[in-house]
Amino acid sequence: MDVYGLLGNPVGHSLSPPMHEAAYRELGIDARYVTFEPEVESLEAAIRGAGALGIKGLNVTIPFKQDVVTMIELDDLADRIGAVNTIGFEGENRTPVGYNTDAVGARRALEHHDVALDGARAVLIGAGGAGRAIAFALADAGATVTIANRTEEHATELAQAVPGATGHSLGELESLLANAEVLVNATSVGMEGDRSPVAADLLDRRLTVMDIVYQPLETRLLREANEAGAETIDGAWMLLYQGVEALEQWTGQEAPVDAMNESLRGELSDSSGAFK
């Protein structure tokens, strides 16, 4: 039996195990997906131990996505983003190599909804870990990226690392959205309480609006965007596709997206408080 897992702390309510195990069943793979909660001082030892034990792959979640960067080799995208959420053990020595499938997950979520990113004008709200991954994903797909953040200097700092991006304060959203085609909320606003990072009167039918928050699935931002006639993409799509990308990275097989999506949305309908 193959073993895959998730490193984080806490991970007790993760939705990744049922989603990945649904894929294993569909593909006929004899495997389990388990969770691990090391302390940060034991993180590197946990990764090396996983390799020694023959674990096939690991996902990495809060609070370790940036901690692991200095502990393992990185592919180009993870190196540029400065964060890892997937580890593969490669070669005869089972060298741990880090990837960032959050970025690919965001891109694939948008592409699944037929959003053309090449040449698009995209506004990204948030300059944290998720914001970093999404900013690079948008830029690499050919979009012009405008980053707005509560602390403007964080947006400017991220923009300096992302080709062609600019950084702004949230107070500039009205002017930033005037010519935008894509809006992505990469903050946790809307996860608790009926709040939105964007005033409803700034939303209209020209926009495609994606929110990375997946509990609730319909955030206030998405509800008001839908009422304004915009196309909306809920946060479960990015969660799904980062998992799809990780599974394909580990197994070399095409992921059963429908089975994974059905499992994920079934879990979301039954749970609360889960955080990847």
Image: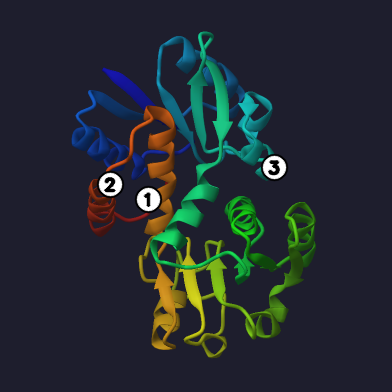
Vertical position of residue 87 compared to residue 181: above or below = above
Mark identifier at residue 80: 3
x then y, percent, for residue 30:
22, 23
Between the residue at mark 3 and the residue at mark 2, the CA separation in whole angstroms equals 29 Å
Q: At 39% across and 36% down in the image, what residue appears? A: 248
x then y, percent, for residue 148:
68, 69
Q: In the structure shown, which secondary structural element does the residue marked by tag 3 occupy? A: helix
The answer to whether residue 264 is seen in the rendering is yes
Q: Quadrant of the N terminus?
A: top left
Residue underneath mark 1: 240
Q: In the structure shown, which secondary structural element does the residue marked by tag 1 occupy? A: helix
Residue underneath mark 2: 260
Q: Name which residue type carries label 2.
A: Met
Residue neighbourhood size for the residue with mark 1, other residues' Cα within 10 Å, grouped as few (<14), some (14–19), many (≥20):
many
x then y, percent, for residue 154:
75, 59
Q: In the structure shown, which secondary structural element does the residue marked by tag 2 occupy? A: helix
x then y, percent, for residue 264:
29, 51
Vertical position of residue 158 compared to residue 51: above or below = below
In the displayed orientation, state which residue is furthest to the bottom. 201
